[in-house]
Amino acid sequence: TTISVTSASIPGGLKTSELRKPKAAVPKRFLDDDVRPSDSPNHSLDFESMPLVGRDKEASKLKQCFDRMIETPEDSHDASSERKKELVLIEGISGAGKSAVALTLQKEVAEHIGGIFVAGKFDMNTSSEPYSGICKAFGALCQKIQESSAEAICTVQAGINEHLGSDVELLVHLIPELKGLVSDTINDPAITDLGTDEIESRLERLRFGFRVLMRVFSSVFSPFVLFMDDLQWADVSSLQVLEFLISDTQNENGLMIIGCYRSDEVDENSMLHNKIVVLQEMTEKYKFLVTKIPVGAFGLNEIEQVISSVLPNPNVAATLALAKICLKRTLGNPFFVLEFLKMLHHEGLVLCDVDAKIWTWNVDKVDAETMSTANVVVMLHNQLTKLPQQVQALLQCASYLGSTFSESIIDLVWTTYGRRLVESRIESTASLLEVIVKEEILEKRDNSQYRWVHDKLQEAALTLTGERRESFQLDIGRTLYYGLDKKQVEDELFTIVDLINNGNVLRLSEFAKANLRAAE
């Protein structure tokens, strides 16, 4: 799970995070550093200044939901104006730009004093980990609060102490960052063994705890927007928590939950589909609204806009011809379109005329040399194989650590296991990560955390392991289990157990205690 938190100025002095102007989520992979084609012989493609293309309708609909959520009763004559909770579901295939639409709301939230935008992401490698995305999103928020003024900390702490009491221990076990806000009230964050007969009681206390925590946070930070990406990988417990949060009639504060999911990976038999049906049936009773925003593929016009922005050329016919090829090869998938253009640039099929300050290409050559383009993962795989051997090897290791991981974790895996993947002396983790970040395959976050720029890049890195996937998972799982200290193992327990269990069933007895702990 990958987390980011951005906020406007809030009561108690929580500092405003810098918000970049919302744009399409476009990596600068395989490009030189922020160089424009008109001012350097490096001739980089410029994705940074490209506007969000073809998503005005979707972004406008999302803003309408936000405006409705923050509306005061006197601002509206609508009988539904008492509903201060909005659930927005943004659906579309992978790479359609769902996240980019959701992130357009960051700017709106930042303009409201006290507003906060919390973003979390579910991970395909940890889909069996209970509460994973929810807990990490709340954990990142707790860290942000602890960096603010004493007044803000006291306000949140007082609310938690008053309304949660001893039940906070259950949440602290799942959200370690919460301990910094309640350290005066508990001694040990570990959950006491309750026995099988008390499992339902524990779950009920957890549901109640999440609700109370949201009541506290949304009373201090308003409007409160929680964005959860890749809901198709959410576990059943997380989906239950989202239901409990949006249907909490005792929470009178404004709350908006945005969920993005891949529509082509959610059928009528899936957990997510069934949960959405249940939520739609609950709206009248629990006073919240559900809005679906479908995000489709680009048409020829949108692809022309992208090409005109990234590869400016006054020849309209040439741009249209390239757009037609691009549409044919990518079927209009926005992420694929951008990666396809990067591939053309990398292969020298689009060139910069420095004197004329335009980009040029031979349409027939582009068409002929891209005939074998199968899908974006294959395309990205081919690009990754052109990177240095040790960079590829580290990417293979990182691909099994989830969508987000710490520098210390990948350093342990690389220095312990990575030496077996290369023939020469291994380079330092830091130097390899620097190359990968420059290529915009990974991006560096706060607290020495790294995350994949897009899950398709992670998938492409996974394909580098070929038929060695099982041995990779087992060896990396063992490396983490024996190389981390007790607390770190506890924090990474579900990742470790998943790696080991998927790696080799014959070795499960060696890790029976770890499996038992995860089951608890």
Image: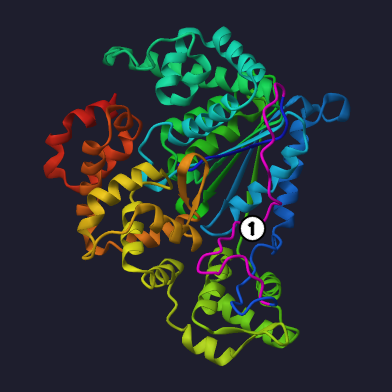
295 and 308: which is toward the camera: 308
**Against 411, is 512 above or below?**
above
**Quarter of the view holding residue 11:** top right
Instruction: Tell me how many marks there are.
Output: 1
Residue 73 at what x, y percent from top left? 83, 24
Q: Residue at x 56, y 92 (%)?
A: 364
Q: Is residue 339 above or below residue 163?
A: below
Query: Closest to the observer: 510 or 67?
Result: 510
- Which residue is depicted at the point 69% across and 35% down? 16
Look at the image and tell me whether residue 266 can be seen: no
Point 54% across, 72% down: residue: 342
Left or right position of 415 against 290? left
Does residue 174 appear in the picture of this structure?
Answer: yes
Q: Residue at x 58, y 30 (%)?
A: 144
The residue that mark 1 highlights is 24
The part of the chain drawn in magenta is 11-37
Question: What secondary structure characterizes most of the magenta part?
Answer: loop
Q: How is the image coloured?
A: rainbow
Circle 1 SS class: loop
Q: Quadrant of the C terminus?
A: top left
The x, y position of residue 156, in whole percent, is: 61, 17
Give how far across and how far down residue 215 sits, in percent: 62, 19
The answer to whether 337 is drawn above or below residue 192 in the figure is below
Residue 300 appears at what percent x and percent y? 66, 74
Task: Name the residue type under label 1.
Answer: Ala
Q: Nearer the viewer, residue 226 or 299?
A: 226
Which of the 4 image quadrants contains residue 247?
A: top right
Quadrant placement of the N terminus: top left
For residue 7, side relative to residue 269 (left or right): right
Please check the rendered image and state whether residue 496 is part of the magenta-colored stretch, yes or no: no
Based on the picture, tell me whether residue 34 belongs to the magenta stretch: yes
